[in-house]
Amino acid sequence: MAKNLVFLDADVLISSLYSSKGASYEIVRNPKIKKITSIAVQEEVLGVIERKFKINTKKTKLGFKNCPIKSLGINKQEILKKYSGYVVHQMDSHVIAGAHILRANFLLTFNTKHFLVDKIKNNLGIIVLEPGFFLQYLRSRRGS
Amino acid sequence: MAKKVGRVYRIPKQSLSFVFTGLDKDLLELQEEDKKNLKKVKKTIRDVRKELWQKTSSF
């Protein structure tokens, strides 16, 4: 397992594209943070950008430059069976599935209330955090 | 961190940020910038996720 591999949820990627003054942008642009996301999350990001923002595709693609995108190779039924117990809403299951299948140590999202963070940490070994708290964690490790 | 002013100790507002939020002041500002922007797209993200979930059979 890669050290500190971070799975990015759609809201983090969207925020990084929208503003260069946020914690999400700091994470996405930092080459020392190993990041990953899934094809499904990428599709969500593109869908939101298409509807809501006037961000050109070049900038969108640059946003994904430092974040490899992987297929999970799992169908919806399997995702529901294995991962729906870790989320409040079923349709968030693919996010936790992505973090687990791609062997991430952290899942970064602003949607932490919809993930059962203690159960995820205990059973899957994945720490669910908001981006600012992940940066705080990195800072505390540098200080120790 | 605390400075004595007269008979009382004063703690700068920045230093209290971590105590109350778990984040240093600069990181709290970064986090708030993100949240401010995401307020505008929260519903769109849910709608797009719902549609993707309904139309996708394999991830």
Image (cartoon, grey):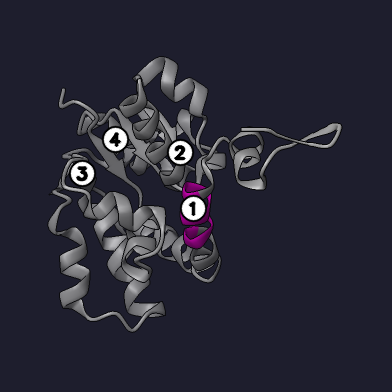
Residue nearest the viewer, comparing B54 with A32: A32
Residue depicted at 54% across the width and 47% down the height: B25
What whole-number distance in Å separates the C-alpha atoms at marks 4 and 3? Answer: 8 Å
- Under tag 4, what secondary structure? helix
Residue depicted at 38% across the width and 68% down the height: A19
Return the residue at label 1: B31
Mark 3: amino acid: Ile
Is residue A16 depicted above or below B2 in this figure?
below
**Magenta-drawn segment:** B26-34
Q: Is residue A18 left or right of residue A29?
A: right
Residue at mark 1 shares a chain with residue at mark 2: no
Q: Which mark, by number, is residue A99?
A: 4
- Under tag 3, what secondary structure? strand
What whole-number distance in Å separates the C-alpha atoms at marks 2 and 4? Answer: 18 Å
Return the residue at label 2: A133
Return the residue at label 3: A36
Q: Nearer the viewer, mark 3 or mark 2?
A: 2
Q: Position of residue A85 (x, y in %)?
A: 48, 28
